[in-house]
Amino acid sequence: MPTTDLRLPATDWGLPLGRNVVKLVRRPVIRNERSRRLSGDEEQRLLDSCDAGQIPFFKTIVILAIETGMRRGEILGLKWSDISHNRRVITLTMTKNGSGREVPLSQRALQTLSEWKDHCEVDQSTVFPMKAGALEQAWRRLLARSNVKGLRFHDLRHEGVSRLFERGLNMIEVSSISGHKELRMLKRYTHLSADDLVGRLG
């Protein structure tokens, strides 16, 4: 049975091409950034529902995510030795973008961490003894208890970064906290403080 050679030269189609032109075609850029924020009493409902759950530190995780804009992996990888209560700073030695950074803590973030430390086991080096899969399961249960719809845990990072802008921090300051290496990634947050800027312009 004769075989067909599929590796036909470009000249077979009457197109004497010296290279594969398909490689020159740029792939379309997919804009799938989410902009979901907490609205109304959603934050309070989430926190109240944390108290009704079985994980004693989950409320601390939620508050920390909102207050710092840290990523899920950064929060779950925290050790008590990473936290300086005197300086009110978390030191992350290695992050998703391949470098470390220091994350300043608000008074609210520091307080919730201190309260959890007072209740956790003394010899526990990891702040939150939980894996990513367990967090996702706990998060789904929390959404069901609080009746909050369409919110991902990662949206808390978006909420946290948005609030940093609303507090008056500039793009460079926010990027040093959030860990965004490319400032263009932060541009989608800046419009959130437009109403506040009107007042500041006079």
Image (cartoon, rainbow, N blue to C red):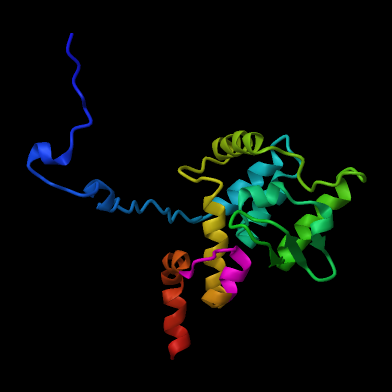
Q: Is residue 40 left or right of residue 12?
A: right
Residue furthest to the bottom: 202
Q: Residue at x 11, y 36 (%)?
A: 12
Residue 77 position within the rendered picture, expressed as x and y whole percent measured from the top left = 72, 48
Q: Looking at the picture, tell me which residue is in the foreground, 180 or 127.
A: 180
Q: Is residue 158 left or right of residue 134?
A: left
Q: Quadrant of residue 90?
A: bottom right
Q: Looking at the picture, tell me which residue is in the foreground, 160 or 143.
A: 160
Q: Is residue 61 above or below residue 199?
A: above
Q: Looking at the picture, tell me which residue is in the foreground, 12 or 55.
A: 12
Q: Quadrant of the N terminus?
A: top left
Q: Is residue 181 magenta?
A: yes
Q: Residue at x 83, y 54 (%)?
A: 80
Q: Is residue 168 left or right of residue 102?
A: left
Residue furthest to the top: 1
Q: Residue at x 58, y 37 (%)?
A: 145
Residue 130 position within the rendered picture, expressed as x and y whole percent measured from the top left = 72, 39
Residue 89 position within the rendered picture, expressed as x and y whole percent measured from the top left = 76, 67
Q: Which residues are magenta?
A: 173-183
